[in-house]
Image (spheres, rainbow, N blue to C red):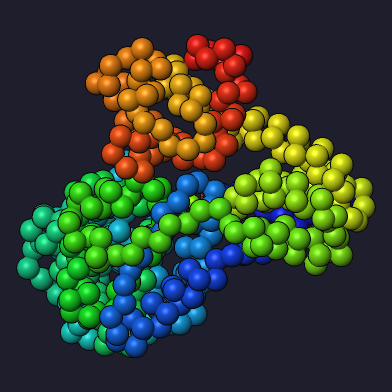
Amino acid sequence: MKSSFNPYNPGAGTPPPELAGRDPLIDHARTAIERVKNGRSSKSFVMLGLRGVGKTVLLNEFEQLAESQGCQTAMLETDPDKPLAAQLAPLLHRVLLRLDRVKKAGADLNNAFGALRAFAAAFKVQLGDLEFGLVSAPATGDLVIDLTDLFVAIGEAAKKRDSAVVLLIDEIQYVQKGDLGALIMALHKISQRQLPVLLFGGGLPQLAKLAGDAKSYAERLFDYPPIGALDEQSARQALAAPAERESVRYSEDALDYVIAQTGCYPFFLQVWGSHCWDAASKSPITLADAKRASANAIAALDEGIFKVRLARLTERQKAYARAMADFGPEPVNSSDVATALGLSLSQAAPIRDELIKKGMAYSPERGLIGFTVPKFDEYLRRAMPNKKGKAS
Ligand SMILES: Nc1ncnc2c1ncn2[C@@H]1O[C@H](COP(=O)(O)OP(=O)(O)O)[C@@H](O)[C@H]1O
Ligand SMILES: [Mg+2]
């Protein structure tokens, strides 16, 4: 059918035509925002899930929710190569400028601008003109202390303006370890004082462990809702509803087939939906259309994101990943991978860590290692059939 009417939206962070199956998380966020806005305590949360499950899409949704409630938002996609201070300062600057527009400068806002200026100086961050701001005490250069002071000052300014500040941090697993500890400490202080600052995060599933290491009470301070494949009914809706709006139906067996092929993973639902649309010549989309679409979808993924991901690996990382792939889609014991490679655990561990650092693999718990993208194991077995680590 005509590509120009294709309703599906595969891509990183691209809004789906039907945001299916996420109402509980959205309601959770809405309640948290409303509570914090009304001066009540509210728990920050960090969604943990593999790539392509819809974390970024939800963070964007929460940002809109917060804005529509009159909150000031700061959205950060974490850059693994930059310290948190350098990434946060410009966003917090923008928040302060917007709070200033809500109600003109008072002592509280001057104080917050002053804290930001001191913070920026201590961490050598260039900001635009900080024309406001008292000359406040210089920051200490210790992120735990300075970020806490800054959050408190911003929280107080927001509170005076009946507003709230909502931080949205994507790819939060890339926040450097000490920085994550500081972030958690600062939010801890904020929650003790019931100031209106809230964090929503998204990241790969090893994060809870990272945060746990960073500060032991992190587990109590945040919720870590897991986010994964959709339930089957929501997956059907994600596929069928966008087509229906274009007066196109799926036959029952076609829908069953696509559901099975995608494992109900949001990104794959968009990819398969899009290929089904292109493969069918008219409504309804039949099983035969869906089968052709599925072959095309797999070929497109192989030539696209999977190939790109594989190309980012060194030879020894490829060999490690290929050995993992033999164990199937679920996380596997890294000692088994080492054995399969004929390496000792300590020889294999650095390779495993490189894969984690590149965001290709994650460790759901000590000793286990899994791929961050569903179906990547299948791809590796297809692309490297001879196991030797050589792509064919
Ligand atoms: N609830 C959903 N229903 C249908 N499609 C979704 C849903 N959430 C996300 N998607 C689609 O999945 C893809 C990946 O979403 P994204 O937010 O980038 O995932 P993540 O950030 O977890 O890697 C996008 O194409 C998006 O449109
Ligand atoms: Mg994302």
Answer with the quarter of the image where residue 353 lies.
Answer: top left
In this picture, residue 48 sits left or right of residue 92: right
Residue ID at (40%, 61%): 225
Q: Position of residue 62 (x, y in %)?
A: 47, 69
Name, please, the residue furthest toward the right: 282
Camera-side residue of 273 and 64: 273
Residue ID at (75%, 64%): 241
Residue ID at (58%, 57%): 230
In this picture, residue 384 sits left or right of residue 74: right
Q: How many marks are shown on the rendered structure?
A: 0
Camera-side residue of 281 and 224: 224
In this picture, residue 39 sits left or right of residue 242: left
Q: Position of residue 341 (x, y in %)?
A: 39, 15
Camera-side residue of 349 and 17: 349
Q: Position of residue 253 (x, y in %)?
A: 82, 50
Viewer can see residue 145? yes
Answer with the quarter of the image where residue 380 lies.
Answer: top right
Camera-side residue of 283 and 367: 367
Decide: is 184 above or below 106: above
Decide: is 279 above or below 54: above
Q: Specify the quadrant that holds the C terminus.
A: top right
Residue ID at (76%, 34%): 295
Viewer can see residue 112? no
Q: Position of residue 287 (x, y in %)?
A: 85, 45
